Amino acid sequence: QVYHSSFIDDDEITKACGCPLLPLKTHIKGPAPAADSDKADIVDEAITFFRANVFFKNFHVKSPADKLLIYLTSYINIALKRLETCRTLAVGTKAIINLGLEKVPVPGEPGFPFPGLFTLPQSGEEAELLRNYLKQIREETSGRLLNCAYRANGTPNKWWLAFAKRKFMNVVIL
């Protein structure tokens, strides 16, 4: 049984390309609304559920938030792949920063994982809104993931980095 997002479809939440722009607990500048610091956000869910969800080859989408959870699970998989060879927190941080500097593709562009997960943008503004949100959520996920992937002394946490070898939904990460 795959773990689904607890964020249900809410008409008050802004969407871009069918992706809900859910609130985040973040200091990173972007279009995401601020979330309560005492409640879990979608990034917390993605990191918490990652090690279970990565084993599944199918993911039945129950809400638009599940689509974002799929995207974040895939991104965490990519990030762990980059961190796999980094032996210290400093080197891992540099690798994650470089990953964050890469161009974030939106639906319809080459390099976007899971074509059909989100609808194609209807305008350039919608595409930029989604791109900026995905960039913001990727940066926030990266920062929190470093706390899981490395111990307090800066050494790799093998119980997390071992999941870099897993394929999520049979997608091969290069």
Image: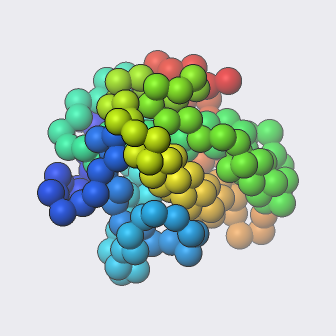
Q: Quadrant of the C terminus?
A: top right
Front-most of residues 83 and 18:
18
Front-most of residues 52 and 44:
44
Q: How is the image coloured?
A: rainbow
Give percent across and percent down for residue 102: 70, 42
23 versus 126 height, above or below = below
Q: Quadrant of the N terminus?
A: top left
Give me the residue at 56% from left, 69% from top: 29
17 sits left or right of 164 in the view? left
**What is the quadrant of residue 58 in the picture?**
top left
**What is the quadrant of residue 166 in the picture?**
top right
Front-most of residues 34 and 106:
106
Residue 118 visible in rendering: no
**What is the quadrant of residue 70 in the picture?**
top left
Give percent across and percent down for residue 113: 49, 28
6 versus 174 height, above or below = below
Give me the residue at 24% from left, 60% from top: 13
Give percent across and percent down for residue 131: 51, 46
28 versus 142 height, above or below = below
Give me the residue at 25% from left, 44% from top: 64
Give percent across and percent down for residue 45: 37, 56
